[in-house]
Image (cartoon, rainbow, N blue to C red):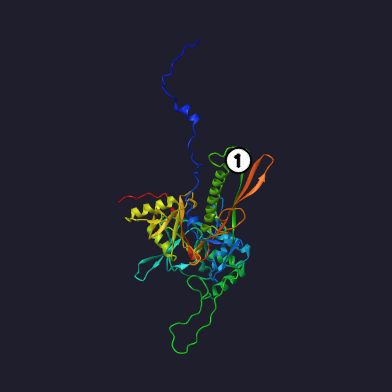
Amino acid sequence: MPEFIPSSRSSLGTDAARNLVHTAKSVPQMQSISSRWLLRILPWVQVAGGTYRVNRRLTCTLGDGRVEFETIGSRIQVVPQELREIPLLRDFTDNEVLTALSGAFDQREAAAGEVIAHAGQQRDQVVLVAHGKVDRTGTGDYDTPVSHGMLTDGDYFGEQSLAGAAPWEFTFTAATPCTLLVLERGAFEQIAARAPHLRTHIEESAARPRPRTNRRGEADIEIASGHHGESVVPSTFVDYEASPREYPLHVAQSVLRIHTRVADLYNGPMDQTEQQLRLTVEALRERQEHEMINHPEFGLLPNADRTQRISTRTGPPTPDDMDELLSMRRQTKFFLAHRRTIAAFARECTRAGITEPGTEFDGHHVFAWRGVPFLPCNKIPISEHLTSSVIALRTGEDNGGVIGLHQTGIPDEYEPSLSVRFMGIDDKAVISYLASAYYSVAVLLPSALGVLENAEVGHYDGAGDR
């Protein structure tokens, strides 16, 4: 018989004891759940018919977009049809001539600090900024340089040279290494000689009187003021856009599948169906916020108005950049940015010796600038070159701001504008539920949404020197 060896333990071990007890458990955790501030701060508007129409005054501003480029081998070329974004070429429909113009642009590189065009010199070329930043400066009332804004990818200048030679109004300097596409006046004249209708179109466009507009590009409302006696009071009317933009509700969906054996037997102490559904809804809401930021049709980043986009001047987001973004609209309520962008801005504040106390918002102490809370949003992308964007928002229908769109009261509603519908049980005894979230986001006035672009988030030089 084997020799009996007594155990040195004098009581029941914990490993064996655990076989007789219930363990305390957490609900299933999910790392991808974020704060989703955008969904929390937007005022949500009921859209009973599934579509929201934004009526605006007629806007007369044309040709204020950006041109786009394509890369062919090592050569960058402007997309021919994108040349219509230049005001003098707006509505020019001859694609063959546009293709010839596109091919006539020469690709050039400009080093940081290089002057591309001097104010007062003869303007004899059209310049497209394919990559980089160009500073546009003039002379102020006190003979000091005054910046008139930064031009970035897709911007252009010198388009008036197509209508005739004239002096440059500003000096254009490469703020960073730049890739430029340049159309010389001579090359344009050669194409125009072969296509007389091109020259005719440009001459008519240049001679066409511009409609009277306000500073936002809306048709003027005639008003008399400061007159005396029986002066003639002008008559007027307010014109509307003939084809206002409509925002249909979009949908994010998923089919949740649960085996009946799991749903029947493994429900204590937590309901399996409830937990599966909870995490599925979290994923739907995450996708909803991502689409509201990035969707090409209605997302905030792709659909911000061209006039409400600015670029950082030196790379990282600085207090000067944020002040300029803030000054572009009334009643800015929130900034949205990636956490790394907020950290980059905080470093620049430290570098400038600025201490921002932050603010209390919705029970949280958050970073702020000029009293406007900075809310983190991980749906704002960071590019491979470590640049990102900051979104500035004015919200609410009464303010002509940004609003969320949804429809409540839908069948099988689980949360507002989110339904969970039973789809049946298949021949493998698997239950299916269709989870659907309906949503969109609308910008009532262009000035309600601003974007600071090309903010470098990996810049550390000089931070903390003080």
Residue labelled with disc 1: 263
Residue occupying the point 44% across, 15% down: 5
Looking at the image, which is closer to me, 53 or 73? 53
Asked whether residue 53 appears in the rendered view, the answer is yes
Q: Give percent across and percent down for residue 138.
A: 40, 67
Furthest toward the left, the residue is 466
- Secondary structure beneath dot 1 equals helix
Looking at the image, which is closer to me, 247 or 312? 247
Residue occupying the point 64% across, 48% down: 422
Furthest toward the top, the residue is 1
Asked whether residue 117 appears in the rendered view, the answer is no
Q: Give percent across and percent down for residue 82.
A: 57, 61
Looking at the image, which is closer to me, 87 or 115? 87
Say whether residue 357 is left or right of residue 429. Answer: left
331 to 224, vertically: above or below:
above
Q: Give percent across and percent down for residue 393.
A: 47, 61
Residue occupying the point 55% across, 57% down: 69
Residue count near mark 1 (Cα–Cα under 10 Å), binned few <14, some 14–19, many ≥20: some
Which amino acid, by three-letter code, is at mark 1? Answer: Ala
